[in-house]
Amino acid sequence: MRFLMTGPTKGRSVRIPGRGHPRVAGCACAALLLVAAPVWGQVPATAVGLGYPVAPIDARAAALGSTGIGLLFGTYSLRNPADLSEHRRPGFGLALLAEDVDVKGGAVPIDTGRERFTVIRAIVPFAGWTASLGFGGELDQDWSARFTDTLVLSNGRVPFEEVREHDGGLSAIDFSLARRLGPLSVGATAQRLSGSLRQTLIRRFDNPLEGAPTLTNAGGTQRIRYEAWRFKTGASLNIAGRFLVSGAVGFTGDLTAEPQDSARSSVLFDLPTTVELGASVLVADSVVLTAGGGWAGWSSVEGLEEFQPGLRTHDTKWGGVGLEYRSARFLGFGVPLRIGARRAELPFSFGDNPVDETAFSAGAGFVFRGGVAELNLAFEFGDRGSFADDGLEESFRRLTASFTLRQ
Amino acid sequence: MPRFVPNRRFLAVGRFAAVGRSAAMLVVASAVMLACTEDPLGNLDSGTAPGVTSPTTEFRLSVENLPTWRDTTVSGFTLRSAAGFILLADQPTLQSRSLNSINVPDTLTTIADTLPVERFESASIRIAIDTTSSVFATLPLTVRLVSLTQGFESDEANWTQAAEGRSWMTPGGDLGAELSSVEMTEVSDSLIFEFQVPVDSLLKSWQAQDGDPGFALVLEGPGSQILIRAVSLRVEALLEGREVPIDQELISNVRTFITNPEPPAEGLALRVAGLPASRFYVTFDPPDSLGGVPLLGSVVNHAELVFHPLPPPAEPYVMERNVAVRPVTLLADPFEFGAKTPIGSTPAAFTVLEPDSLAVGELFRVDVTVLVANALFVEADSIGQVRVGLRAEPDGQTVGFWEFGSVEAIAGLRPELVIILTPPPRFGVP
């Protein structure tokens, strides 16, 4: 879960116009360096606002346009608790996402990678009920920038390496319960949102040049703890096992961001209400057509501009469609094939509009022993943002792998 | 012999396992390939990289702008009587003579025992000359060994007085009879002069009077000066009850050298080196903030005191060679304890002062990073005082010295404090 941007050893000097030699009452100052520009150059999506929203979905849903709601034959995604009723046997699943990203906006794109668990979930049906305990990704805030530069002093230069790193994010511990009432299912979820972020700045000075003195390294760190509650309720309707429609609404309380080891007081962010809908239909016994979408009121999040000048928050919409062919076989095993497409908006940008993310997906499953074990892979190719409009732009190639076991 | 034949069920499980392994390996390999993304060259720098940074800024303050600053020169740490050398000079700008006294003992100690001296068979004064530090303007030159007619106090004698309140009859020492002389006609790397001295009269006199009144070494060689590392009396003595005389070397333990002119007295400038050895001490309170940046909580990347050299002292007291100067922490207020101020550790490496560089105005920079950084931790919410002394390492290696501008100097020559500072990064949430 690391975003690493490595700059070359350029050894060039940085002299910020207008910042040299400011006068301070009673002393002459040669102040030569390095103040963070209010608008950065190449910004990873995980560095903007509260981070990059992670969809808590498995690989099957990822291959089907990241729908994950109202999916026939069950999903381990955390979108709608009512969808739990599609599981008739106890099971366990986990999904890992790896993403290769080009961060654009500069003369040369920065190639980097991110990995994260998107969902881990155990499901237990009993007497018309289905319960689950799970973990889902919520916000990814990991990134790291490393570069070399040179500090110019009045009597020489000192090369240095600087590391700026954010390590952390927000996850959800999910407890869900669903009740099947004939074709109708209803469900409810309580999620404890919890996480932490460690922000680090390290500046390591190298050997001085041209008579400059040897400098002590500098930097600092700050830890932030996050906590919030979210409650979701949803319903789904399964008609004859061939058509499933599903919807859920989520209400999230204030996210408390509490800096540790700091005099700074806690900050509250009003996380959004969410609405998600999805449906799927079984066509000709072997083809599943699915579509889903949702809305999140991220514009309720206020106060971020204080920490990131120019940042805007936006309500967001997402939508995806997918097609699954379930009858393919290979070496005697079922190999469902999937394709999908999606479009989503990201809530944080430096522009007037939300950041658009579009992706095309394809995937396959490997079903062992009639579904006792199942491996699913999803490949996505997409872009997000426009540097000119949003202040961030990335293209990405993503692999989601999930593995499930059923009794 | 039974042979293992796999049944169909085993083959199916084996195929399952093989496919499972292949699939698992595919997933792992794919994940690893993507997870371990190469990080090629990017084009980030301080201005374009995302995230919070904190400026590293250089501040240069003239010390009169500090909350407090005091400086002073303290002299007398090494006197001429304790220096590691003796200077003889016969130059237009400097006349220098050596005064010595050797207490000839009544007894001598051998490996076996200590016995009274029955008689001295022979005696000679030996001097070892440091030719690399000497100036031989003319050859031949002569070193004369002359008896003194008036005793001296080695810590108090100078060109005009033999002791505090007791003047020489003749400035430069009351010289009596010449005991011996050596003429030097050529220079070699190692020079030891030996003066034969009369046994009966002189040694018995020194024996009787504990070495008083002593003798002087006088250089006659216009434009020359020689540096003597050691003066000793070599005797061949017959001890009571022994039939074979023994050789012994007695070190001149009461000695000094006197010069004309005397070193100039210390003024307001900050002086280091010389004989008597001078150091200078400074105390100051760092400012609470610089350019709006509070020092408390910030990282002091570097702090140094910058001293501006004054023009060279008048001849002959220009520092004659490179001198290593090291900072020392002062464990008490030097303005209360003066020369008795206890000194502590060395917070930074020494600096070599080069006379040629100082003469063209090269600044003397003293690293006080550790001292300033420590001052930030004296108390939780206030900054402590910095006390630092500058001393030659070791003291007393040169007759000459150098002076630097103090806070009383004219603008441009006053000491300065340079601090390079990085405030704590102001991380946001998140």
Image: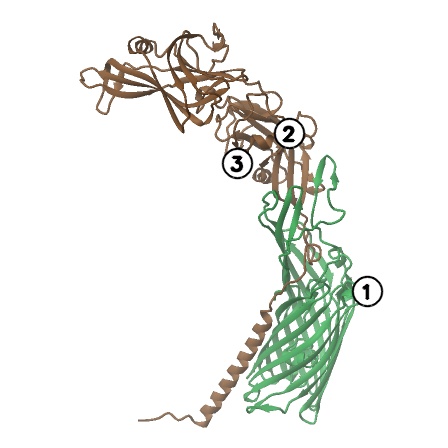
Where residue A373 sits, quadrant-wise, is bottom right
> Is residue B393 shown left or right of residue A336?
left
Which mark, residue A352? 1
Query: From this viewpoint, is residue A276 visible?
Result: no
Residue B112 appears at what percent x and percent y?
A: 21, 24
Q: Which residue is mark 2?
A: B69
Indicate whether B249 appears above or below A60: above
Where residue A383 sits, quadrant-wise, is bottom right
Q: Secondary structure at mark 1?
A: loop
Q: Colour of chain A?
A: green
Q: Secondary structure at mark 2?
A: strand
Indicate whether A331 appears above or below B306: below
Camera-side residue: B156 or A130? Answer: B156
Identify the amino acid type marked 3. Answer: Phe
In this view, the mark in front (3 or 1):
3
Chain holding disc 1: A
Q: Which residue is mark 3?
A: B350
Identify the amino acid type marked 1. Answer: Asp
Residue, far right: A352
Residue B308 appears at what percent x and percent y?
A: 63, 31
Q: CA distance from mark 2 to mark 1?
A: 55 Å
Residue A368 appears at what percent x and percent y?
A: 55, 87
Camera-side residue: B358 or A206? Answer: B358
Q: Residue at x 63, y 76 (%)?
A: A399
| Discs 3 and 2 lie in a common subunit | yes
| Discs 3 and 1 lie in a common subunit | no
Camera-side residue: B345 or A262? Answer: B345
Q: Any idea which chain is the brown one in this picture?
A: B
Task: Locate the N terminus of chain B and report the quarter of the image it occupies.
Answer: bottom left
